[in-house]
C-alpha cells in the first residue's frame, strides 16, 4: 500500500488490518477464553482476512492482522516482531525481508517462552501467503523501498 497510496494510506490500512486481529482476540480474552482458544480466534481472524468470502476469497496476506492479534496475546512477542521488522527495514529497506525475519525471530522467541504451539501454524500460514514475496526476495527481484529524497 505504501507504493500505491503513500504513507497515510499505508498507515491507515496497517491500523485497520491490525484491528482485525486485535479486536477479536481482546474479546476472547474478555470472555475468559484459554490461551489456546485466543490463538484459535486469531487464526479465524487471519483466515477471514486472507480468504474473505465477499472478495472471492482473495484477501490480504495476513501479517498486520497477525501482528494486531499477537500484540494482544503477548505484548512481548508483538514488540519482538515490530522491533525486528524496524531494524531489518532500516538496514535493508525491503519489507518482505523485514517481515520474514520478524516472523522467524518472533516464532523463535515464542518457542523459547513456551507460547502456544498453534503460533507455529499461524507462522506457516503467513509463510505460505508470502511465498511469491519470498521467491522474488531469493531471486533478487524484490525491490527496496526508496528512502528520503530517492535514496
Image: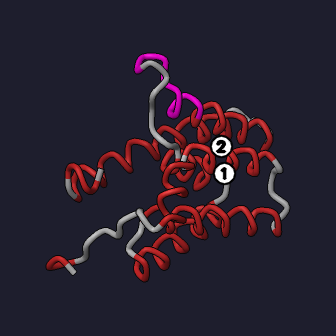
- The x and y percentages for residue 93 are 38, 74
Asked if the residue under mark 1 is in contact with the one under mark 2, i.e. CB atoms within 8 Å, the reply is no
Quarter of the picture containing the C terminus is bottom left
Q: Is residue 22 left or right of residue 110?
A: left
- The x and y percentages for residue 118 are 78, 45
Magenta region: which residues? 47-55
Label 1 neighbour load within 10 Å: few <14, some 14-19, many 20+: many
Q: Which mark is residue 126?
A: none
- The x and y percentages for residue 50 are 52, 34
Outermost residue toward the front in this view: 139
Residue annotated with mark 2:
125
Q: Is residue 36 left or right of residue 77?
A: right
Instruction: Using the image as rendered, state which of residue 1 and residue 140 is in the foreground.
Output: 140
- Residue that appears at 42% across and 17% down: 54
Of the two numbered discs 2 and 1 in the rendering, the one whose residue sits closer to the viewer: 2
Q: Is residue 90 magenta?
A: no
- Residue that appears at 62% across and 45% down: 128
Label 2 neighbour load within 10 Å: few <14, some 14-19, many 20+: some
Considering only order in the chain, which callout, 1 or 2, is on the residue closer to the N terminus? Answer: 1
Residue annotated with mark 1:
73
Q: How is the image coloured?
A: secondary structure
Residue 134's place in the image compared with 13, above or below, is below
- The x and y percentages for residue 15 are 38, 49
Q: Is residue 149 left or right of residue 113?
A: left
Amino acid at each position: 500500500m505504501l507504493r500505491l497510496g503513500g504513507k497515510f494510506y499505508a498507515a491507515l490500512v496497517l491500523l485497520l488490518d491490525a484491528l482485525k486481529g486485535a479486536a477479536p482476540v481482546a474479546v476472547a480474552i474478555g470472555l475468559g477464553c484459554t490461551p489456546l482458544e485466543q490463538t484459535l480466534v486469531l487464526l479465524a481472524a487471519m483466515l477471514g482476512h486472507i480468504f474473505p468470502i465477499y472478495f472471492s476469497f482473495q484477501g490480504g496476506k495476513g501479517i498486520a492482522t497477525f501482528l494486531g492479534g499477537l500484540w494482544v496475546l503477548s505484548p512481548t512477542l508483538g514488540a519482538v516482531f515490530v522491533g525486528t521488522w524496524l531494524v531489518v527495514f532500516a538496514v535493508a529497506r525491503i519489507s518482505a525481508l523485514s517481515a520474514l525475519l520478524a516472523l522467524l525471530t518472533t516464532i523463535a522467541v515464542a518457542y523459547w517462552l513456551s507460547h502456544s504451539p498453534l503460533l507455529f501454524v499461524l507462522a506457516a500460514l503467513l509463510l505460505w501467503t508470502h511465498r511469491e514475496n519470498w521467491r522474488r526476495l531469493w531471486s533478487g527481484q524484490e525491490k527496496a523501498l526508496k528512502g528520503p529524497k530517492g535514496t
